[in-house]
Amino acid sequence: MTEISSAKQIPLHNVHVQAGGKMVPFAGYIMPVRYSSDIEEHNTVRNSVGIFDVSHMGEFMLKGPKALDLIQYVTSNDASKLADGKIQYSCLPNDKGGIVDDLLVYRMQENEYMLVVNASNIEKDWNWIQQYNTFGVEMENISDQLCLFAVQGPKAASALQSLTSVDLSSLEYYTFTKGPFADVKDVIISATGYTGAGGFEIYVPANNANYVWTQIMEAGSLYGIKPIGLGARDTLRLEMGYCLYGNDIDDKTSPLEAGLGWITKFSKNFINSANLKSQKEEGVSKKLIGFQMEERGIPRAHYNLVNASGEKIGEVTSGTQSPTLGIGIGMGYVQTAYTTPETEIYVTIRDKNLKAKVVKLPFVK
């Protein structure tokens, strides 16, 4: 019970309990893992619209004439390419070849940025960035001031449109705007998400969170909106091949091994960039792949991946039964020789080596 008692409650804890949410400790917070069933919630998001309370995520504001210089040094992607209202996926490389965290960088305006980081890494990321802040950048951790609601699914724009004068259908993927939302001024409305089903992430002042949640549920009721838990969030992101920090990427995995070369830009100098550049030139010995089961079985994190001779070639990092495809799918690191799509590999499940094949991500197109 110590894990539950030491975990923080998110502001709408009681709302989720009343809605039938099963509350569990996750990333230092008590979070709703499901309300009905993972499969039903998964399908609600894929086919219509669902709302996640992901208020456990962390947000930092970085301001000042050198804010971009600091971001350029601590992140791997090239944030100089951002214009106001644009968002970038990036990572914080550590000095040993691994990843401190993956994150989103929002350019609010010139000299002002918001970084959105994983809940379990808020303190770690803050300390990491701060130790490199020799640029005089004003940093503020606003994680406790904001609640974050992810309204995801093909009907998300229709479900939310009555709550704002912002034309939601015109917001391009990975862009955001600030505007009125559910009678609250200057809400950040972001065309992002972790599901691949389309939709928005709404950053709301914590003191308005209860009201805004209720407004979203009422406006979305015409479209069948339902609250969705972490269980479905995990199966949705896995079907898209999105990395989960702590599973698929961590302090020991390099962005190049993780298939994140596209966010690792050597046109600038950043933490450990010289070593990562050599790694790119020399090639990596293992890589993150997606695979799907050819035989019945559900792969899970830490299961061994083996070749036809039964020799270990890697390990599963994330795995599940895909609700959309109806088969077992997973991600894991394997020796580079086994990374080509259609390559036959095997997953050791309960002492049996079951056949699988490497596939190109995402699993669900």
Image (spheres, rainbow, N blue to C red):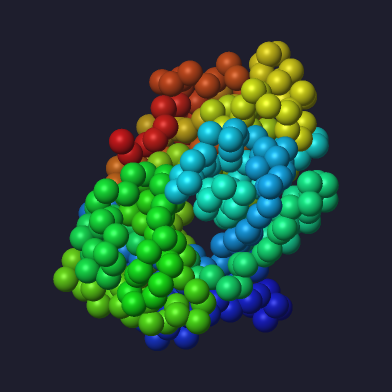
Q: Picture coordinates of residue 75 (x, y %)?
A: 66, 39
In the picture as drawn, the residue positioned furthest to the left comes out as 222
The answer to whether residue 40 is visible is: no
| Number of numbered discs | 0
Residue at 37% of width from left, 36% of height from top? 363
Residue at 42% of width from left, 60% of height from top? 178
Residue 332 position by quadrant = top right
Residue at 76% of width from left, 40% of height from top? 94
As rendered, which of 278 and 187 lies closer to the eye?
187
Residue 342 position by quadrant = top left
The answer to whether residue 101 is visible is: yes
As rendered, which of 211 and 338 lies closer to the eye?
211
Q: Picture coordinates of residue 89 (x, y %)?
A: 53, 42
Q: Picture coordinates of residue 5 (x, y %)?
A: 67, 81
Q: Picture coordinates of residue 244 (x, y %)?
A: 55, 48
Whether residue 294 sits left or right of residue 96 in the image: it is left
Q: Which quadrant, please, contains the N terminus?
A: bottom right
Residue at 61% of width from left, 72% of height from top? 144
In the picture as drawn, the residue positioned furthest to the top comes out as 282
Whether residue 235 sits left or right of residue 62 in the image: it is left
Q: Which quadrant, please, contains the C terminus?
A: top left
